[in-house]
Structures are given as C-alpha cells and as structure tokens.
Amino acid sequence: EPEVTQTPSHQVTQMGQEVILRCVPISNHLYFYWYRQILGQKVEFLVSFYNNEISEKSEIFDDQFSVERPDGSNFTLKIRSTKLEDSAMYFCASRARTGNTEAFFGQGTRLTVV
Amino acid sequence: DAKTTQPNSMESNEEEPVHLPCNHSTISGTDYIHWYRQLPSQGPEYVIHGLTSNVNNRMASLAIAEDRKSSTLILHRATLRDAAVYYCILRRAGGTSYGKLTFGQGTILTVHP
C-alpha cells in the first residue's frame, strides 16, 4: 500500500538553527500539507500546497517557515531559526485530488529544540 | 468551519461494538463528515467519511442522523489495535480550503482485553 514517508523520524536541533523536515508524498497525489502536534495538544494545520504554490496557511506559519517541492517527489518544511516552542511532531500529508478524498499522513518527525 | 463536539473519552471491551458519537449542530449542507483516528505515536489515519447516507467500509460504519446534526462512528468488533484518539471533522465541499483538516481534541478510546 502506498504511504507518505517522512525523514528523519527524530531531529534534535539547537535554538536558532535552521532545520529542514523532509517528506515523500504518495506519487500521484496533488495536494500536500504540513501539520504539527505539540505534545499533549491537538493536531494543528500549518500549510497546504498545490500546483507548486502555497494555497493556504495558518497563523502559525509565519516568516520563519517555508515549504518547497524541489524535485517533484520531495516536499520539505524549513524552519529558519528554530525556537523552543517549535518542538513538536510534524506530520506531512498528501491527497490525490480535489473533492472529499482522504488525506494520507506520514508517521511524523519529532522535532526537539534545545 | 462548523464545530464538532465529541466526548473526551470512551471505554470498550475487546470484541464488543463501539459507538463513538459526534455532534455537529451547525453543519452546513455542503459539509462532509470525516473521521480520522490517531494511534499512539503515529500520524492520523483516515477512517471513513459521508455526506447524508450511512456508509460502510472495511474499518467501520458511519451512521448519520437524518437532520445531519449528529453522527456516530461504529466499530463493529473492537480490538486492542483500535485504541486511539478518534476525530470527527467537518470538511466543506468546494470552496478555497484546499482540503485542510481542522482537528479538535477527539475522543480517546480505550479498549480493555
């Protein structure tokens, strides 16, 4: 069964450092998303990406965040200067097409900022 | 987005049916009802979705009230692997949301052996 793959599974970084989280969505999918989940809290939407551009972003997704689909297979989330409060699980998701199709989520990357 | 209300937690015994309720009294005519679940230490996983009619798939059944103000996710025979947080989410058809999902706190389902 096709799946969304995220790497690394766990990343530890120092405050102020840049970090890139990587995702390989399912190959024929068109819509891509990043969500995050701070420990013990609910899953929060960060950004959606379609047709090589951001289609929607939340208030959390400020200038420190960026997304890219550099080569048609990878989908990355970059945090330019990490803060302690960026520590969370980050989930990538993809969806095949418009309409009410299901979203497929990756296993997540646990980001720890120290 | 219209709001959903779910119980914080529910318990079940293995092999028994589980009915997980969700209230969505402000649902609009174009809102689909989606259910996802999140197993411990994993990403969310799609379970089922519907608009007006009851739906069945290999994982579960979705019963939607006639007025659509509530729905129930039915797990016919709970297993230990079904222990998870279950999220009831409304998603509007069309529009400009591009398919984002707005998660609430969900229902924590505990399954006893």
Image (spheres, coloured by chain):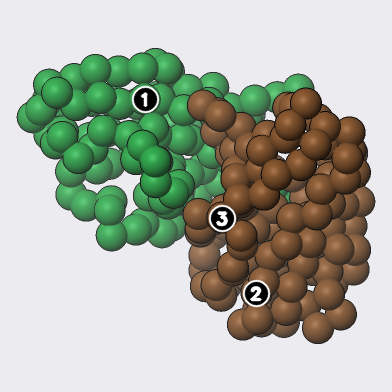
Chain colours: A green, B brown
- The type of residue carrying mark 2 is His
- Tell me which chain the residue with mark 3 is part of: B
Q: Which residue is mark 3?
A: B8
Task: Locate residue B94: give its quadrant.
Answer: bottom right
Task: Locate residue A5: give its quadrant.
Answer: top right
The numbered mark at residue B24 is 2
- The type of residue carrying mark 3 is Asn
Would residue B16 be seen by someone viewing this image from the given angle? yes
What separation in Å lies between label 2 and label 3 (alpha carbons)? 15 Å
The answer to whether dots 1 and 2 both sit on one chain is: no
- Tell me which chain the residue with mark 2 is part of: B
User: For this view, does A88 lie left or right of residue A33?
Assistant: left
Q: Which residue is mark 1?
A: A110
The numbered mark at residue A91 is none
- The type of residue carrying mark 1 is Arg
Q: Residue at x 51, y 58 (%)?
A: B104
Mark sitting earlier along the chain (2/3): 3
